[in-house]
Image (cartoon, rainbow, N blue to C red):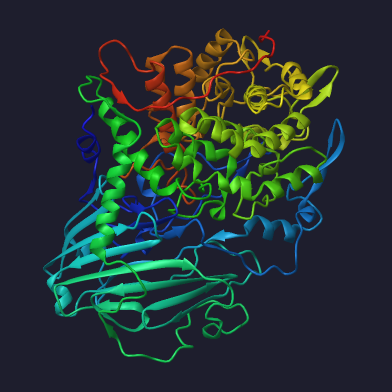
Amino acid sequence: MIDRERLVRGHNVVVTTWHPSSTLSVGNGDFAVNVDVTGLQTFPREHELLPRPVVVTDEHGVRRLPPREFDLDDFPVPLRVQSTWGWYATAPGRPYTLDEAATGYRTRRGEVRYPDGLGPAPEAAAWLYANPRRLDLGRLGLDFAGRQVGLGDLTATRVELDLWTGCVHARFTVFGRPVEVWTVVHPDRDLVATRVRSPLLADGRLRLRLSFPDQADPLLEGEKLLQETVYGEAWAERRVGDARYVVEVATDGVLGPELLIGTTADELTATAAFAATRAGTRAGDLPASEPTTGTRAGDLPASEPATGTRAGDLPAFEEVRQVAAAHWRDFWTRGAAISFEGSSDPRARELERRVVLSRYLTAVHCAGTMPPQESGLVHNSWGGKFHLEMHWWHAAHFAVWGRPDLLERSLGWYRDILGAAGETARRQGYAGARWPKQVGPDGRESPSDIGAFIIWQQPHPIYYAELLRLNGGGDAVLERYREIVLETAAFMADFAEEDGGTYHLGPPVVPAQETYYPDRARTADPTFELAYWAWALGVAQDWRERLGMGRCAAWDAVIDGLARPPVRDGVYAAVAVEPYTVTDDHPSMLMALGFVPETPMIDRDTMAATYDDVLARWDFSSTWGWDYPVLAMCATKLGRPEAAVDALLMDTPKNRTLAGGHVPQFRGGLSVYLPANGGLLAAVAMMAKEGGFPRDGTWRVRQEGFGAFPTGTVSCAPAQ
């Protein structure tokens, strides 16, 4: 048995020297608070994202960020409070439709309209792309009674994230006096609790403040955003655009105007709960007005500061700390674990650190009731929307790490938008349900000349459902996800277009390796997507048989007739048309074996040659954080354990793991990138299950509790 507490606490995050990248998170999957070296959100300006580099367009029409050497100072991690439910939109100039942002593309079945953002109404495309956006709900930080205090005024700083209990504990000295702070989030409620201990409290030089900064997302030209705050005795209601939410506060201290909290004692505790409010709630407190910027604190009669105020039934700090500790203890003791203690390979300790921190971060940021955005509940990327092709990387690992319940938490959302996905398919002339790519909670696609053409998110719901069936769900999963699996497969089969007895994917299409998007109107048959299509349709057929429905002949025709992945010079090409393979961005050909279970679509020898070719020729500075798990999973399937470890720990700018476990990607946009963390966990699980660690005596691997990955079920003819 692995001593799990020792394993986990051995990788507690301890920061003694401040850096803007050293932000720590506490949260529960649906709600997270990101804190600085004070254990709260005291210095948000110092953690703000830097300006994003100007995008350049190369000679092939591909938009790119200019190459840049890795510099830790490029990656401040912002101090935000974010949730899965907190979204806002600005008022459009008029009601817009997605069709206004669409143009027609020629397919073998005739013209199909895609929302590429190049339609007749560019203002519609811009607004639909930018809205809705995820809310930054507020800041809970220390206030030094009006005195200007900078990070340089703090000495003897030490902040520790105790992974075993999910609690941050900070210590520092300011004004020559010690300060201690504990911060924790409730596991089942959108609620943060803190305890502050210092003699500075009693003499009035230290207080707590809950504030509401303006939203950081840039506005479109001419766009205005209403931002108002109304304060009550122990609550504040906030309006941002079309959204309203309320924050209630309970404290054993003195609650003053605008939620400034002080005390005459040496210790102070406070709890703040965040919740969305429906339109009309406390409507009299927020009078209608034209969109403005700024904060208003009027509209309620002034009241005397309240001592010992408790809002509603909010739990006190100690109760939250205890229930959070129990939750995290349960998280770490259930499911799988892996230890590399005793390994002589000097990289083993670092891989174990990345695994433990990735488990914590994905539980905080990726285990909610909706798919997460790529930057989790830390800061907005793409306005806070989630990218459904990335959902696998965020959350599929939960199932094979023995926590399928954490994957399933977000799958109900697919059921919620099934009608919208079906309407998308019907509007384009297809059967079944076509899942969007870049999307908010409403399930509406965002106009894009890349995202609207990406298809590799389509098989994902079948993969998730099969993961649940294999990992404890059994036959009950069949009925629970029957409609999602069958409607997904119906679209996939209909999307593949027959020409001369062969079924093709596209054109138009943009593969996982998005470099080819300028040629989307003629791109076809990407290697990875072909293998994934055949495998997922095979799983759907297996589900039909388990459900007593029998196989669908039309689906079998697609499986057997799909174009085989293109091969050039003995290696798999990325796509079946010129330029065939561009050696940058994602080496997605490798996903056809590893990410996709082994199928007759892929020849192992050809894939082995492709793997070697990628290592020899790829521009790894252009990759993304989940590409290294792609390599590791492919290497595992090829029986190359040394290569799998080398891939996971490859030293490139996109594969650096910060002290807190985050994997930054590019300045100004992605200081954190959770698909890299989830991908690492998926790869390590596969390596643990399938002998993917070196067997030369340098690695000592102890593992327990891992579940099952899906296997190949495709009946198509072998690859030629």
Q: Residue at x 52, y 71 (%)?
A: 277
Q: Residue at x 47, y 63 (%)?
A: 136
Is residue 650 shown to the viewer in this render? no
Q: Quadrant of residue 35?
A: bottom left
710 or 244: nearer the viewer: 710
Specify whether 271 is left or right of 460: left
Quarter that holds the C terminus? top right
The vertical placement of 577 against 195, above or below, is: above
Quarter residue 8 falls in: top left
Residue at the far front in the pictured view: 548
**Place of residue 247 in the rendered image (x, y in percent of width and height, measured from the top left):** 42, 71
- Percent position of residue 522, x then y: 78, 31
Going by the image, does 282 lie left or right of 99?
Answer: left
Which quadrant is home to the N terminus?
A: top left
Is residue 259 among the parts visible in the rendering? yes
Nearer to us in this view, 260 or 471: 471
The answer to whether residue 477 is left or right of residue 117 is left
Q: Position of residue 552 (x, y in %)?
A: 75, 24
Residue located at (54% from left, 39% from top) = 390
